[in-house]
């Protein structure tokens, strides 16, 4: 039987779900056994990534490499949610263009059977600028996917998350909180760019090398429609330690670069990047990963407007 080994962020997420997370983890070996039979797989080692899922390598009976992703329950009930089903729909709509290729979907277990990809962009050599260029080029391919997906008020959702979690943890500098809320209100209004099918979380760890395409493709899509500047903002939200070392100017340059390369509105890209930096720090802090959370929140203080 396959031995389950969760990644650190996934362990923290499971713990945050309480009894529902513990029950999911208890069932996981049996679920994997069922999937191995359904898809005629032999298990290999667990794979990095997957803060809200278990990701493991496998081979088919013909020796073809695959990846299986089993999604964690979204809430405290422990029920299998539609998250994996929606992800499967996004990947089918993309057809391998800008995204990993989907081979099959097991709705009862919230599981996906995917093509095996190479290492992530986060592990690739090169400068942050090169990484951002690759992310932008990958997103431009991914944005061509056509799917009738929801258009949530993402700015409003993030504003509410910031307020709720900062009220709970008191982790934000007051100026950071004020700016995050103000930016969210600004971003709730429509921007100049046409809506696209967004990935929703295109950080370098979610862009993997693909031998099939000779480029990088995205994994783990949230798959909602909205402002393309949102995806660019997510791409800019990380590297908190670098921002702490070099200050606001480095983020200004990165923002100029991704907006220019993509043709997307620069002002909204900046606002989304700040809002994502703050909300991500609070979200990660809320499920106990303080060491991961602090660079997001500490670097945000350097990005507060001075006027």
Image (cartoon, grey):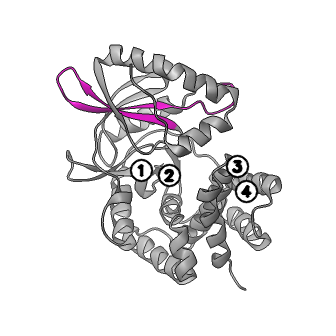
On whether residue 306 falls in the magenta region, the answer is no
Decide whether the magenta segment is chiefly helix, strand or loop: strand
Q: Are marks 1 and 3 in contact (CB under 8 Å)?
A: no
Work out whether mark 2 precedes mark 3 in sequence or the reverse, and give the earlier one. 2
Question: Can you tell which of label 1 and label 2 is closer to the viewer?
Answer: 1
Alpha carbon of mark 2 to alpha carbon of mark 3: how far?
18 Å
Q: Earlier in the sequence, mark 1 or mark 2?
A: 2
Q: Which residue is tagged 3?
A: 286
Q: Position of residue 159 (x, y in %)?
A: 72, 57
User: In terms of secondary structure, where does tag 1 sit?
Assistant: helix
Q: Residue at x 48, y 29 (%)?
A: 85
Relative depth, front residue between 2 and 224 = 2
| Mark 4 Cα shell of 10 Å, populated few (<14), some (14-19), many (≥20) | many
Along the line of sight, the residue nearer the viewer: 103 or 142:
103
Q: Which residue is mark 2?
A: 201
Q: Label 4 vs label 2: CA separation?
A: 17 Å
**Separation (CA) of disc 1 from disc 4:** 24 Å
Q: Nearer the viewer, mark 2 or mark 3?
A: 3
Name the residue beneath numbered marker 1: 206
Residue at (75, 65) in percent of width and height: 172
N-term-proximal mark, 1 vs 4: 4
Rendering quarter of residue 132 = bottom left
> What percent of the width, then of the height, locates residue 33?
40, 16
- What segment carries the magenta color? 53-77
């Amino acid at each position: 039987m396959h031995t389950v080994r969760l990644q650190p962020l996934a362990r923290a997420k499971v713990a945050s779900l309480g009894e529902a997370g513990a029950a999911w983890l208890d069932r996981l070996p049996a679920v994997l056994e069922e999937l191995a039979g359904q898809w005629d797989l032999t298990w290999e080692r667990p794979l990095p990534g997957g803060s809200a899922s278990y990701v493991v390598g496998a081979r088919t009976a013909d020796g073809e490499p695959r990846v299986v992703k089993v999604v964690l329950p979204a809430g405290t009930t422990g029920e299998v949610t539609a998250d994996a089903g929606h992800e499967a729909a996004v990947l089918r709509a993309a057809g391998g263009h800008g995204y990993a290729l989907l081979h099959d979907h097991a709705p009862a277990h919230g599981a996906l059977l995917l093509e095996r990809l190479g290492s992530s962009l986060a592990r690739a050599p090169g400068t942050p600028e090169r990484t951002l260029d690759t992310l932008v080029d990958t997103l431009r391919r991914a944005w061509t996917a056509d799917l009738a997906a929801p258009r949530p008020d993402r700015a409003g959702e993030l504003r509410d998350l910031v307020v709720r979690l900062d009220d709970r943890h008191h982790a934000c500098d007051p100026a950071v909180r004020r700016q995050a809320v103000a930016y969210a209100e600004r971003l709730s209004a429509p921007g100049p760019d046409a809506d696209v099918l967004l990935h929703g979380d295109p950080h370098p760890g979610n862009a993997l090398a693909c031998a099939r395409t000779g480029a990088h493709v995205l994994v783990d899509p949230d798959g909602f429609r909205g402002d393309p500047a949102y995806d660019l903002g997510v791409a800019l939200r990380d590297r908190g330690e670098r921002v702490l070392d070099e200050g606001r100017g480095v983020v200004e340059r990165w923002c100029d670069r991704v907006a220019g390369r993509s043709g997307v509105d620069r002002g909204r890209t900046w606002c989304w990047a700040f809002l994502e930096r703050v909300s991500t720090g609070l979200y990660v802090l809320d499920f106990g990963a303080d060491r991961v959370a602090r660079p997001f929140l500490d670097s945000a203080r350097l990005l507060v407007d001075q006027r």
